[in-house]
Image: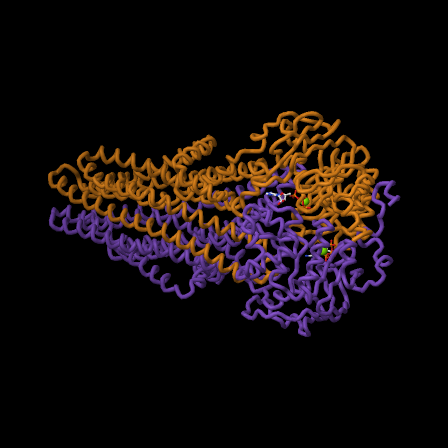
Amino acid sequence: MNFTINMSKRIKNIIAVLYPLYFGSRYLKGKRWILYSVICISIITAGTRLLIPVLIGDAVSSVQSLNFKRLEYFAILILFISAISGFFQFFVNYGSQYISQLYAYGMRNNIFEHLMKKKFLFFENQTSGDLLSRSTMDVEGTRVFIMNATNQLLPTLFMILFSLIFLFILDPLYALIFLVTVPVLILIGVTFQRKQRVHWRRIRSYYGNMNEELQENIVGNRVVRGFSIEGEETTKFNSTTKSYFDEYMIVARIRGFHNNLMPLTISIAATAILLYGGYVSIINASQVGNLVAAVNIFSIMTFPISSLGRLIVFSENARASIQRINMVLSDEMQEDIQSTRRSKHSGDLLINNISFTRGKRQIFSGVNLRISQGEIVGITGKTASGKSAFVNLLPRFYEPDTGSILIGGRDVSSIPLSELRRTIALVPQEITLLSGTILENITLSDTSLSLEAVVKAARIAVIDKFIESLPDKYDTRVGERGITLSGGQRQRVAIARAIVSEPKILILDDATSSVDPETELEILKRIRKELSGTTVLIVTHRKSAIKFADRILRIQNGSVEDIFDLEEDLKGIVDGANLYRGGDENATQL
Amino acid sequence: MPHSYEEEEENFLRSEKSSKVFRRLVGEILSHRRDSGVLITAVIITAIAGTLYPLALGFAINGVINKNFTDLFIYSAAFLGFYIIQFFSNRIRTVSSTGVAQKTIKELRDRAFTSIQKVPVSFFGKVKTGYLISRITNDAETLSEFLTFQIPQVISGISTVIVSISIMFYLDFTLTLYALIVIPLLSGFTLSIQNKVRRNYLGTRRTIAAITGNLAENISGIRAIKSFNVEERMAMNFDKLNSDNFAANLKAARLSSFYGSIIRVIEATGIAIVLLAGAQQLFANAISIGILVTFVIYVQEFFDPVTQLSQLYNSYQSSMVGVTRIYGIIDSPSEESISRGSIKIEKFNESIRFENVSFSYGKTMALKNISIQINKGEKIGIVGHTGAGKTTFSNLLLKFFSPSSGRIYVDGKDLTDIETESYRKLIAPVLQEPFMFRGTILDNIRTFSPEASDEFIIGKAKEFGLYPLFENLESGLESEIGEMGRNLSEGQRQAISLLRAFIRNPEILIMDEPTSQIDPYSEKLIISSLGAFLKDKTLILITHRFSLISLVDRAVSFEEGQKVEEGSFSDLLKSNGVFRKMYNIQHNTDT
Ligand SMILES: Nc1ncnc2c1ncn2[C@@H]1O[C@H](COP(=O)(O)OP(=O)(O)OP(=O)(O)O)[C@@H](O)[C@H]1O
Ligand SMILES: Nc1ncnc2c1ncn2[C@@H]1O[C@H](COP(=O)(O)OP(=O)(O)OP(=O)(O)O)[C@@H](O)[C@H]1O
Ligand SMILES: [Mg+2]
Ligand SMILES: [Mg+2]
């Protein structure tokens, strides 16, 4: 009873070795027939490969019986069969590459599309380094298995099957001896598989860590240098590579034993056949051809069988990878980005009783607000009071727990994201420019924009003069994350990028913090003049910007309220309200 | 048109010989004397045992034909014995080959990482993060397969070939010559496609690096992509790179599969020749049937490593391309090798002096002819329009870059002659863009001051008025802040960046817009605590915030890379320059 359960579990485990192949086949989209043909052809090649030792055996027999004509015939047959086998082998090798590359191609696109569809929330708990390793190395891990499964694993399995048949034809007892080894091989394989599983999971996750640490170290290189913590960083990285190394060594030790046990098992069976067959043919004075063929079959088998262990390694690696890939492919935390409709809504904003929590913290509760089209609204409040959280709700980067947000009278949750995010443009506090030219960055939202529109946007963002002063003008490359621009220049390019497609609602989330007040004011003036009718929300700490607004909101203790008496209500909240004197005593004279 | 780093590297790779890189790699592998010694021994023993078993088989068969039971038993036992020897030597080989491979990979990665810590800052302006990561992780990984499986295969292949040819010659000279007829055919064929194979692999590595680069950029720029709803366009761009990679891989696969098939036919030709020639010999009574059987097996044995060659060759080319890329990072000239500073300084005693310093990142000048002296204990404010060169000035001070012309003296010594690390130990910067590591807030401080205890950090946070900014977080300073500190507000991030610098208690504090995102109320708390802290410290403060100017003794205005004003707060307000204009705008005294 127990034994049967054990056995069925084992068999399940054995089949699970092939799971990554099944997983991969689901991503072949209509090209699955190639996979099936490769498998069929690999059956043929496995058969023809095994035919050769049989033919050699026959050839030897004909030598023994001094039949030269027959020998010639067999020699030519061997050549002919090899040519056929070589011909088919081409299709097996190329086909398995094709299938596996097709899988990698499809899977990468699939992962990419899923990543693009994920909500903002998803990325808060992920690191880019780890996501990167999931979409590259983990795909590669499965691909390698799929390739080897189609060009080695399956052929090997068929070869084992055919060997059995050939051996049976040669002598049923040979087949019986061979059959005895099969459960032993399975047992070794399964134990091997089970023992290394956890280590492969660790290897894959250490690999992810390596990516994360590299990413942080490279992006944060100035902090690392500025504080001279290169030593500590190196120690940290070395310890990750050390853990990675250690896990690999554990797997190697497991592999060293189990993997080599497989050919040993086969060779014991071969020796048994040699002894039995030799004994029988001495007694019967029969021909040795059959015996030669049988032993030859075994010697051909040892290499593929010892490579079975390697395939089990690949399979475990692939399964650990699939687990990590599935995290990205799950439908959780997705938003619907598709829609061809690109019309814009009006800039009227109505907020009804919204509450919002971050983690366990309530950031807003019961906020009501109406902002009409064309208003310029300043939003201020202490650090971490929830200003960014508030503005991020409007384009649905995050969703409120309760309440509704209406734009032009329509609930934002019923507006397709493509329309909503065309209607609302948000310039975040933390700017991400993409590497490429300034022009490519400004036209991110729409590549078909005319140069005039781009220049106009640049002018409003007061970055036009600077761009014109560059040797390559709008075609200047900005480097990764816009690294070759100054802080304020980067922010202004981002503003130009947001206004170029003429949104109805423009949100500047402290988007001019690195810009000097004079330039900032100029930007605001140009926005008011050139983008009249656009609702503008300006999150800021600066008094000069606050004063510019038509209306001021303050976020405090989870609520949003209007401010009417600037001097009194904003004491200590906006810059410049307190320190008229600067640091210099003499300044009082002014 | 200036070449990008990737293009330059591509050109370099094309010209670089695989064999040169391979020799260097082998040198490094052999430097692990013990491991590689064990590996080679194990491989050779395996190979010899592997080549001897057909001999045992042949003798056993002869025993059968001669009806000699003793021979049959003895040689059968030997046959099994060789397999048992192989089992043990193979076990050692498996472990030691993984050891050698993974050790080499680990070392390459570690060295590349160390090298990245030493390259000049300008390096990061040229190379994309994704490309760098791809090199250190993916490219290093290509070595794994090559070193773990292929290299031992080659060594064993070579020993198999040597042993089997010797035995064959020993058994029968003429027949061996027949067996070797196919060799020139084989090598000629292999050599003829060599260059093509290499070119194909360059293609696959290049396209995969492009994929990684694009992914890295899109993942880190995901917020911009989503806010402009251009996900689909990005997916289309990605698909293009992805199909390039697909095509490149198929191209490589076609050639390698073709190679594999041809090898198989050549092998069969070899066997057929041996059979026919062997039969002739047999009729001439020159050899026994046993020997003929042995010969046939040897020809197969001999071809096994050769068939492997097709795989080996692919793996060799692809990993050599990968390794060349890592060597590219390891060999990047370090900052020290450029500036060669050797003077260690322990303390800042007198002054920092800029003498006619100009600097350009590329074509246009970012700083022009700056002369300025900052004495120990002085507090200097720097103001100016966006893009005026303020951050650039601090970059030079931090020795991230060196002046294009002119000199910077620290205590009378040229900064380029001073050892960077000892100099940076005197300084703590607050950069314009705060950078956060994953982990908690406390982790983010401790990374920079490992000796600081939790209580100490919390105490300091309170002392500098920063603590209230974190009070509303779930677990206070123990909160996990996510990648790049994304789970915090921007102002909170700046606060951490400030605390980091304060806790280092440096002699020189360089702050670039340190409070641009912090509300003035909190800022006031910080400022009021700084007075005592800054006593005896030297401060260089870049700011647009006039509230912070209360901390400085002297202010300098920059305009388009030039110093246009310098003086005390009141001096500058009296003159009619940039400083006064900015002041007025912020205080609305006249507009
Ligand atoms: N991803 C997140 N997960 C959990 N909490 C978060 C996350 N992002 C922000 N918070 C918390 O929400 C609160 C409000 O943050 P928000 O970024 O909205 O502040 P803010 O008013 O914009 O501040 P600042 O002026 O510094 O930009 C902060 O306490 C912050 O720590
Ligand atoms: N890595 C770089 N490569 C090329 N050019 C650069 C680089 N960094 C800055 N620049 C250029 O040098 C000039 C000065 O930049 P800097 O960052 O010093 O300005 P800043 O005064 O700090 O401005 P902001 O107030 O906007 O931060 C700018 O025109 C900028 O485009
Ligand atoms: Mg914010
Ligand atoms: Mg700057």
Quarter of the image that includes the C terminus of chain A? top right
Q: Is residue A477 left or right of residue B471?
A: left
* Residue B301 visible in the picture: no
Instruction: Give the residue at the far front of this rendering.
Output: B576
**Nearest the camera: B589 or B400?**
B589
Q: Position of residue A303 (x, y in %)?
A: 34, 47
Question: Looking at the image, is A493 positioned above or below residue B498?
Answer: below
Ligand 1 image position (quadrant) = bottom right
Chain B appears in which tint?
orange
Q: Position of residue A427 (x, y in %)?
A: 66, 57
**Tell me, what colour scheme is on the image?**
by chain
* Residue B341 visible in the picture: yes
Where, by quadrant of the figure, is residue A213 drawn?
top right
Q: Position of residue B38 (x, y in %)?
A: 43, 33
Q: Is residue A98 left or right of residue A462?
A: left
**Nearest the camera: B36 or A87?**
A87
Task: Tell me the purple chain.
Answer: A
Where, by quadrant of the figure, is residue B357 drawn?
top right
Q: Is residue A68 left or right of residue B472?
A: left
